[in-house]
């Protein structure tokens, strides 16, 4: 080993005599090596040459121990590597600062080179040289070896093919962490982010690290340790296969990692939900309150027990109600407390939540608490709820959740004054600030303050235009504001609003005010507005006909729209495809009856007729009403007559269908013979008085005999109108022989025969008298009223014939 060292020293002396060109070539050859501290040194020992060059350029008055104790950053700033080299060398070479692994120092680096073997052997081993290193040489990864043998071995390097640097030492994680200086571990993040290694020699150790260990940053060790801890179970128990590896882990690192939020990726959905709930600070309080709620809502819980549970529940949630009322599960607990609690409990709950009513109305779950306050609260509580809404109505009505609360408060519990307080937000800011307790509607405001009419209507228009949305228009409070606007607006303002509202009329038909607004759009809209409105109703015609207020819009369309072809294609065809559904509904039948006989007082109340008459003043309707009605009647007549034929068995015994059947046969265009024959075929069935097997015969059915009687009485109008087809003639032609005598055996049958005799039609009277011959004595013996009236009519008919 000494001989090899002597040869290396001799080589150093020979290299010193070479010119600068050779030195520059050597430096350029190793430039890449110095720029990459992770590469292994040249096995020929070139690092010793560079160390010699560096040693010769150090100023002689330099004190190596002057910088001892200064911080690494400060030392680098005071003594950089280039400060101790000539300008020419710095410009030509410009080599980066070598790593400590490539430029390790020994006692030879700060003394003269020994010339003989005896001088080499006389050098004593140095135990620690960290204190004698100059500050500019302390940029290193690990500490240097302190023995002469190690220095010489490092200078010689490893032969080609050596794999020493690729052998990973079996060192535990804790030992690796202990060998890393503290300042390096603190700056590990910064060094890893910048992509550069920042070695430090502030801590000295006698155990050198391998190349692989030097390349591994402290951050990777922490990351690996934390990844193992994250895979621990919920009880902080490590996996079995990691126990041996992590047994000597630093306790502080483990505690810091385990205090973090537990990783729930490996848990099921239900378990993750339970973990999230358990992390809440009031978890136990919530669990207990839910158990009380479950017991309170039971039917078999006594009132005394409910009072006791409510007291316990209030004590538990007192002071935390704002947190409870916004959660999906605990909101039910507060609702239950309001519903089953005493008056004192409700009062205390209301006092704690009264300032949050507006916010609660916007919450998906807390809104039910507001409804409970309106339902179970006192008048004072309700008044406070309405006052909290005052000034916020225009914003709340546009909120998807709060609009439902406002609708409930407006329709269910508000009186006239409270309803006006909710609507005043649409009239203008001044009505929100100044209250007038004596006024209960907009009409009184218009009478008392006529100078504010234009201002109110302008504010209403600005407030209503943003509300033309299908999710907002469904509320009756909005319909009320629209109705008031159309009531007091002039024609120009109405036209502007109709143009914006015409395609959204379908969403406001289900309330009284909404239907009136739609009728205003029909009456005062232009032909284009009416066309858009009618087309928007497609697909919902049957439903509109069956609505209590929606069917009025259909009647208004029949009254005003001149384009009857559009009405037939868009509305009537769709309605007639489901004529059975429409006819079975009480409001749908009114639509059919209005087409057959408009504004007939037998079918329509005078108040309804008065409302429909408002549309007669429309300026956009040019066609005569009679012409319009006839065109619509011709469009539905054939279908309705066929409907009677197809469903005659069900219609003739239904009291609700009586007027419809009569109106169809009476007013429909076309030949009603087939419909009459269908009814007569039902009446011609065999009849035995008192026999109820298989149901009552049409002649004894309360609705059936009335249908026959009305159809017979209608023949008188048909005779006056000059129509040739009479129901009485069709009926007598269908009846078998002896059927009239069988009818005379019951009271209702006798009155049916009397109604045919009252027609005073000669042929009908003649046929009836011939059929009833010989029954006069029997009729006088019967006790019911119909027999006596029939006997009297027969006597009168015989006298007339004579």
Image (cartoon, rainbow, N blue to C red):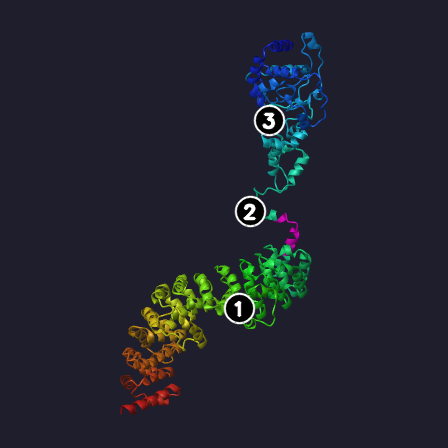
- Dot 2 and dot 3 residues touching (CB under 8 Å): no
User: What number is the disc on residue 453?
Assistant: 1
Between the residue at mark 2 and the residue at mark 1, the CA separation in whole angstroms equals 61 Å
Name the residue at 69% across, 21% down.
134
Marks 3 and 1, how far apart at CA: 84 Å
Is 413 inside the magenta-drawn segment? Answer: no
Residue 751 visible within the image: yes
Task: Say which quadrant the N terminus sits in.
Answer: top right
Mark in the foreground, 2 or 3: 3
Q: Earlier in the sequence, mark 3 or mark 1?
A: 3
| Mark 2 or mark 1, whichever is nearer to me | 1
Q: Residue tagged by mark 3?
A: 215
Quick one: SS at disc 3? helix
Q: Quadrant of the C terminus?
A: bottom left
Q: Disc 1 on helix, strand or loop? A: helix
User: The magenta stretch spans which residues?
Assistant: 277-290
Q: Hey, which quadrant is residue 350 in on the image?
A: bottom right
Compared with 382, 64 (above or below) is above
């Amino acid at each position: 080993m000494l001989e090899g060292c002597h040869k290396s020293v001799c080589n150093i002396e020979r290299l010193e005599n070479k010119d600068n060109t050779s030195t520059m070539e050597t430096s350029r050859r190793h430039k890449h090596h110095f720029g990459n501290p992770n590469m292994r040194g040249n096995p020929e020992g070139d690092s010793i040459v560079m160390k010699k060059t560096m040693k010769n350029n150090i100023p002689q008055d330099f004190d190596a121990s002057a910088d001892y104790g200064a911080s690494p950053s400060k030392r680098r700033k005071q003594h950089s590597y280039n400060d101790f080299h000539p300008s020419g060398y710095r410009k030509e070479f410009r080599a980066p600062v070598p790593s400590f692994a490539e430029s390790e120092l020994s006692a030879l680096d700060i003394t003269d080179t020994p010339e003989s073997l005896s001088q080499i052997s006389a050098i004593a081993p140095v135990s620690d040289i960290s204190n004698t290193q100059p500050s500019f040489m302390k940029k290193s990864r690990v500490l240097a070896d302190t023995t002469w043998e190690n220095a010489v071995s490092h200078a010689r390097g490893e032969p080609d093919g050596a794999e020493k640097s690729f052998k990973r030492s079996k060192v535990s994680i804790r030992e690796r962490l202990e060998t890393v200086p503290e300042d390096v571990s603190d700056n590990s993040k910064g060094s890893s982010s910048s992509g550069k290694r920042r070695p430090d020699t502030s801590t000295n150790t006698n155990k050198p690290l391998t190349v692989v260990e030097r390349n591994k940053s402290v951050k990777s060790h922490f990351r690996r340790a934390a990844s193992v801890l994250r895979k621990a179970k919920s009880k902080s128990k490590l996996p079995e296969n990691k126990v041996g590896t992590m047994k000597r882990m630093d306790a502080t690192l483990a505690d810091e990692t385990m205090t973090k939020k537990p990783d729930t990726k490996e848990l099921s959905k239900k378990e993750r939900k339970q973990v999230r709930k358990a992390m809440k600070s009031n978890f136990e309080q919530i669990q207990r309150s839910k158990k009380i709620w479950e017991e309170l809502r039971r039917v078999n819980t006594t009132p005394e027990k409910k009072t006791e549970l409510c007291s316990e529940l209030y004590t538990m949630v007192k002071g935390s109600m704002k947190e409870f009322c916004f959660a999906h599960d605990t909101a039910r607990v507060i609702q239950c407390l309001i519903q089953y609690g005493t008056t004192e409990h409700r009062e205390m709950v209301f006092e704690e939540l009264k300032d949050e009513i507006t916010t609660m109305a916007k919450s998906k779950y807390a809104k039910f608490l507001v409804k409970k306050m309106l339902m179970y609260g006192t008048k004072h509580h309700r008044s406070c709820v309405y006052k909290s809404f005052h000034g916020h109505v225009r914003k709340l009505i546009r909120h998807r959740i709060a609009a439902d609360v406002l609708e409930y408060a407006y329709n269910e519990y508000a009186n006239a004054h409270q309803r006006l307080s909710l609507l005043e937000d649409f009239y203008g800011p001044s009505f929100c600030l100044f209250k007038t307790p004596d006024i209960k509607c907009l009409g009184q405001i218009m009478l008392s303050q006529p100078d504010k009419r234009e201002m109110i209507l302008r504010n209403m228009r600005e407030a209503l235009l943003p509300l033309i949305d299908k999710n907002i228009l469904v509320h009756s409070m909005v319909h009320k504001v629209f109705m008031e606007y159309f009531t007091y607006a002039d024609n120009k303002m109405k036209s502007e609003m109709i143009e914006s509202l015409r395609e959204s009329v379908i969403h406001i038909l289900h309330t009284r005010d909404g239907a009136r607004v739609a009728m205003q759009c029909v009456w005062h809209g232009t032909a284009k507005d009416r066309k858009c409105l009618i087309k928007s109703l497609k697909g919902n015609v049957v439903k509109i006909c069956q609505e209590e207020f929606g069917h009025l819009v259909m009647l208004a369309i029949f009254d005003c729209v001149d384009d009857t072809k559009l009405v037939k294609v868009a509305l009537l065809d769709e309605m007639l495809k489901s004529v059975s559904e429409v006819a079975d509904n009480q409001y749908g039948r009114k639509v059919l009856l209005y087409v057959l006989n408009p504004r007939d007082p037998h079918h329509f109340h005078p108040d309804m007729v008065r409302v429909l008459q408002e549309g007669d003043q429309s300026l956009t309707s040019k066609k005569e009403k009679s012409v319009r009605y006839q065109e619509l009647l011709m469009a539905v007549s054939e279908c309705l007559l066929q409907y009677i034929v197809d469903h005659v068995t069900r219609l003739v015994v239904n009291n609700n269908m009586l007027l419809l059947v009569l109106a169809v046969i009476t007013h429909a265009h076309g030949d009603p013979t087939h419909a009459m024959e269908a009814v007569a075929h039902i009446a011609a069935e065999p009849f035995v008085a008192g026999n109820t097997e298989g149901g009552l015969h049409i002649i004894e059915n309360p609705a059936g005999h009335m249908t026959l009687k009305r159809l017979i009485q209608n023949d008188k109008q048909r005779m006056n109108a000059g129509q040739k087809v009479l129901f009485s003639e069709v009926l007598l032609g269908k009846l078998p022989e002896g059927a009239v005598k069988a009818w005379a055996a019951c009271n209702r049958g006798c009155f049916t025969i009397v109604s045919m005799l009252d027609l005073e039609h000669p042929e009908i009277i003649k046929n009836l008298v011939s059929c009833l011959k010989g029954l006069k004595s029997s009729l006088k013996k019967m006790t019911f009223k119909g027999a006596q009236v029939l006997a009297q009519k027969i006597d009168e008919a015989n006298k007339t014939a004579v």
